[in-house]
Amino acid sequence: MALRDDEGRLKALLDVKDIYPIELEKVARFVWGTDREEHPGVRIFYSKGKWAIGGEVWLLERVNQPLRDWVLDPEETRKVFEYRGWKRVVGFQTRNAPHRAHEYLQRIALEMADGLFINPVLGWKKSDDFDSYTVLRAYEYLIDNYYPSKRVLLSGLATAMRYAGPREVLRASKGLGFNLIDIDDWRLHYYFTLKEWRERFYRAKDWVIKRYGEEFFRMWELYLTASAVSFYIGSNHLFQFLFSKGVVNSYPVMRRQFGYPLLTA
């Protein structure tokens, strides 16, 4: 079978070994937690059809990609790891431009491992996400000016963002040999943090307007307020996962099982 790109150019050949149906609703519920087409990931998944074809793929020519210079194949990344002498590597997959929370996690990773592999998603994303070029340029600047550049490797992941939430993390972790031992939902932690930032920012209103102008103040006040509200009402979530190798539990541990108080707004 010939595999072609959107313009009809031959890119690969597939030696068909299997043709089988997919239980679309079952897979959708497992991956996204819903089978409703209102979810964009489910809607796109359904649009592919219910039949799948499997077999050996013979690559003839790579698909054209505007950001190809930022993408390394798995074999190439392993060669870089070996060349740099990295034995323990921490991978950081993201779709966003770097911010302080990500920087904090990445610096901790550099304290624990030989190298840090930053792997931004470069495929389809929601229209309100950062564009891929901006994400890559932001990370390049961070690596060149703030990180030990010889201990960080930046390479894009040429795939679409699935937006499957915590399920996406759990599915990926199984293939890496990690065991999940703790989950915590930081939604309300972020709400209270953003609420405090907004209050501090407002208390400095006169100074901010004098230094940066009223438009700047109004923009950031709106951003902090809207962000806090989104975490308060639950339209945004942030989950912390704790993984381990060598510790196996029959089910994930939630902090509330140990009597930790749950935050309430």
Image (tube, helix red, strand yellow):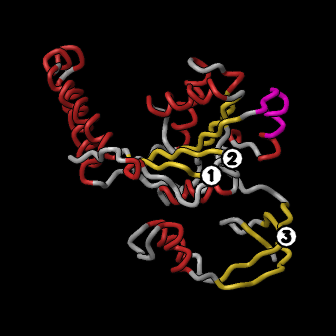
Measured Cα–Cα span from mark 2 to mark 1? 8 Å
239 in magenta: no
Along the line of sight, the residue nearer the viewer: 147 or 87: 87
Residue 38 rendering spot, x and y as whole percentages: 38, 72
Relative vertical location of residue 247 with respect to residue 61 in this rendering, above or below: above
Residue position for label 1: 179
The label nearer to you, 3 versus 1, is: 1
Q: Earlier in the sequence, mark 2 or mark 3?
A: 3
Left or right of 68 in this view: 45: left
**Dot 2 alpha-carbon crowd within 10 angstroms: few under 14, some 14 to 19, many 20 or more:** few
Q: Residues within 10 Å of mark 3 (few under 14, many from 20)?
A: few
Instruction: Give the residues drawn in magenta, as a range.
Output: 78-87
x, y percent for residue 27: 56, 75
Q: How far apart are marks 2 and 3 (CA)?
A: 34 Å
Name the N-terminal-most of marks 2 and 1. 1
Question: Going 66% across and 85% down the picture, which residue do you hit?
Answer: 21
Residue on which the image places disc 2: 246
Residue at image position (17%, 15%) is: 207
Looking at the picture, does residue 146 appear above or below residue 158? Answer: above
